[in-house]
Image (cartoon, rainbow, N blue to C red):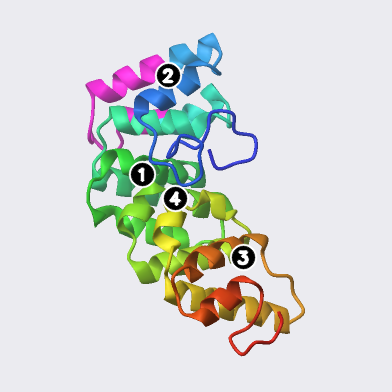
Amino acid sequence: MTHPHATTGTPGTDGTPGAPAATPDDIRAQLDAHLTPAARTWLDQALQEAAGHPGGHGPISVWELRLAEAGRRCGPEHADAARVLILHAARAGTDALTRVYRQGTADERRAVLHALPHLVDGPEALPLVEDALRTNDTRLLAAAVGPYAARHLPAHAWRHAVLKCLFTGVPVDRVAGLERRARGDAELARMLGDYAAERTAAGRTVPAGLHRVLALAAADTPPHGTALAHGTHPHGKES
């Protein structure tokens, strides 16, 4: 989960920063260990309804109503995971996911983002990720930089997503695939160095996660990138 009171882990991962998306079975096992008997009964019924009536039926599907109930039924700390399971049981495609995202609450939007690695194989759902990255909602941002973005977000947009996380205080541990995508990225190293220099010149602190990402990006890059990883500017001035 993306919020601090979660006990079942982020639906998009197994709990390890940058890990692959957890399977629905993994998510269900985590939920079963924490839900009350009444909540498990409700979730069983919601999943059966979603599996029995997938896709869209009329102006709103029964499983979409269950998405709205998940926080009240399962508790806010488990609602993201429950919603991901409902979306998976409903076999929601890109059109349905887009509808839920556009019409839903911030909580439902976050669940859609977490569900993307399970339901969309290609890049066609990237507009949803890009929309989330334009917000300043840190929980939505954390969901947007999950495994789906790691797999499909183009390099330029992904670099800016990392900077957005640093700017808004989203821990870089939430960025799936960070080590793989950041390593040796000279352009990312340049952007991070510029950002650190701007903050230092303005008398502001540099986010702690920046140096970790910069060290990755500076690996196997020209010497000035390595210098930046140790806290110096390209011209040799201390930051």
Kindly report the distance in space between the C-alpha atoms of the residues bearing marks 4 and 3: 17 Å
User: Can you say whether 39 is above or below 122 in the image?
Assistant: above
Label 1: which secondary element: helix
- Which stretch appears magenta? 43-66
Count residues near mark 2 (Cα–Cα under 10 Å), then give few for <14, some for 14-19, many for 20+: many
Q: Residue furthest bottom?
A: 235
- Does residue 73 appear left or right of residue 22 in this picture? right
Kindly report the distance in space between the C-alpha atoms of the residues bearing marks 3 and 2: 42 Å
Q: Which mark is residue 100?
A: 1
Kindly report the distance in space between the C-alpha atoms of the residues bearing marks 2 and 1: 19 Å
Count residues near mark 4 (Cα–Cα under 10 Å), then give few for <14, some for 14-19, many for 20+: many
Question: Which badge, 3 or 2, is on the more N-terminal residue?
Answer: 2
**Residue designated by label 2:** 43
Give the foreground label among 2 and 1: 2
Give the foreground label among 1 and 3: 3
Count residues near mark 3 (Cα–Cα under 10 Å), then give few for <14, some for 14-19, many for 20+: some
**Residue designated by label 4:** 176
